[in-house]
Amino acid sequence: MKHIKAVNQKADRIEAYVAHEAGFGVGHGAPGRGSAANGGGGEPTPPAALGAAGHDDLDVVGLESRPPHEAQGPHFPLGCSLVFSPGWEADSQGGTAGLCQPVERDLFDCHLACFWPAHVPDQLNHAQDWTGKCASAQKDWRKLDLVFP
Amino acid sequence: MSAVAPAVEDRRVALREFHPFEAHGARFLYMVPSAGIFRLDDAGGAILDALGSGPRSTRSLVRELAGRFDSERVLETLDELTQIRAVGDVDAPKEQVPRDLPPPGFPLTTMVLNVTNKCNLACTYCYEYGEDKIVDTRYGKQPKFMSEETAEQSVEFLLAESRGQEVAHLTFFGGETLLNFPVLQKAVAYARRRAAEEGKRIEFSLTTNATLLKPEVIEWLADNHIGVTVSIDGPKEVQDGLRVFHNGRGTYDVVLPKIKELLRVHRTRPIGARVTLTQRNMDVLGIFRHLTEEIGFWEVGLAPVTTQDQRAYAITSEGKDDMLRQFEILAEEWLERAVRNEHHGFSNVKDTVEEIHKGVSKAYGCGAGLGLMGVATDGDVALCHRFAGSEEHTIGSVTEGVDREKQGRFLVDHHIAAKTDCHTCWARPICSGGCYHEAHVRYGTSSHANLHYCTWVRSWTHTCLEIYGALAERNPGFLTRFDA
């Protein structure tokens, strides 16, 4: 840095990290965290540590620690079923017994986040007015019916 | 360079979290929570001053400072301030305190062995025997003395739990430590032998009230390179006020010749004094001068008594102010000596300056229950020596190891992330809520932040930052001794 001077050891590490990030270009990644024991910090991981330990070692540490968003597992809407394929329209047996049964509060979560698009009826082609009787999902969700194949 | 503002990306910027301080005519930032320290130049100072009155766009900042600095300098400095997170986008979310727990297998570096819970003194303020005690040391289940077998098991525990570390520290404590001198001797010999077999090194230290320092004991301490800390409160009238034998007789006349003999003979490790400050002895300067200049201790550390407010010896808020004022005088003295590369025995300032130099940012008030543990006389392992024997604060035993579930719960409950009171405090990288034992005595739970001394800690930390900044300006070479 040209204008601000790093004074203590931690500042040296932050400066080295900033220079390291600049070398990698913008958007290389979010600043890392310090070691857990020192973890009140939120300070960037210094490149010196990267060099000394080697990238492989860091990878091992990375693999051993579970990312924070997985702490409680992935989010599934209530009533979600993971075992059928065609979703709302038919279950894996061609019937309707094993369909997902999301409840009202999760209905729009299915629309937005479902990994299997066919879990809601295909409103473009097959079931265009599936929500025709459902003006307000909070009130009218019971009117959303199964769509039979 | 041009004074005309180039086409710059315009964004609204605001100040982020840091604590500014000045020393020796220079301006510094103590970054929170990273604990990095940066020195500002004129432009950096001007930018922060401008943003101090509220967020603004980069363009208007350039315009505002145009008379003093050209746009390139302002933008470059602003960039650097953004990189160190002193400045950020106005709508950037506040940084959350991360709940990063220590990785499994974190090594134990220091173990404190309570070789006895018996004491030949009856100091009024004692946390082990006095009014604020948390363990029934008199009629409780713990034996009065640690057995040789438990001491050996403790050594094995330390060697195993220190994992990959080459050096481990074993500290002996009491009660009065030297009441169990035979086990002490055996434990040191055993630890040396076993450490050598494991390819490790153990360093030893102990704390004593000095009443039992016989010539053969002193010789043994010197021969074995045992670090010694003497609990002593100061000149005769101070020492004899609260540090007394069971019959109420003062201890000064008994300990003085023994301490002098210790300082004369034991030259292998520096000998320090540990002073407990109470409302009855607030003459910090007088105590310090007596212990260093008249008796000859290498270092003196002073700590306010741990107790509840209603005790007669508890330090009042005026007392705390007075204590701080005297600490500041000693800190200034320490600085002047450090500028000349000379020693000054005020260990409170040295310890804090070292933490500031390293940029320590703590997730926990101290290493208790993680890198430091205390062992009770029966072999139960507690958070630290102050909790030794307390069932509530026991996290394992030297024979059965650490109860990882209990330790895990402790680490979650005591993490800075759980101390919401601390989240807006700029001193949290260094304080992190403070001593668990102090919190337990004050608030009934060790996980509580020590809110009763926040103002004091912030004032003292600010003073130490100023000392650090001044030293960095006047004799930066001195600071390299803290580089390790």
Image (spheres, rainbow, N blue to C red):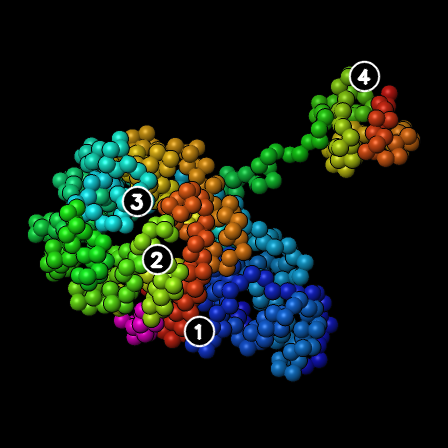
Q: Left or right? Give the position of B86 relative to B456.
A: right
Q: Nearer the viewer, mark 3 or mark 4?
A: 3
Q: Quadrant of the N terminus of chain A?
A: bottom right
Residue B53 on image: x %, y %: 63, 70
Label 2, label 1: how many angstroms apart (C-alpha)?
30 Å
Q: Is residue B363 above or below residue A112?
A: below
Separation of disc 3 and disc 4 at Cα?
75 Å
* Residue at 28%, 38% in the rendered image: B375
B322 is within the stretch colored magenta: no
Q: Which residue is mark 4?
A: A95
Which amino acid type corresponds to the residue marked 1 in the rendered image? Ala
> The residue tagged with tag 4: helix, strand or loop?
loop
* Residue beneath disc 1: B23
Q: What distance separates the C-alpha of mark 2 from that of mark 4?
A: 78 Å
- Mark 1 or mark 3, which has the lower sequence index? 1
Q: Is residue B64 above or below residue B375?
A: below
The CA span between labels 4 and 1 is: 78 Å
Dominant secondary structure of the residues highlighted in magenta in the image: helix
Task: Say if labels 1 and 3 share a chain.
Answer: yes
Q: Secondary structure at mark 3?
A: loop
Identify the residue under disc 2: B315
Within-10-Å neighbours for mark 2: few <14, some 14–19, many 20+: many
- For marks 2 and 1, the one nearer the N-term is 1
The reply to whether dot 1 and dot 3 touch (C-beta < 8 Å) is no
Q: Chain of mark 3?
A: B
Which residue range is magenta in the image? B330-342
Q: Could you tell which of marks 2 and 3 lies nearer the N-terminus?
A: 3
Question: Which quarter of the figure has residue B60?
Answer: bottom right
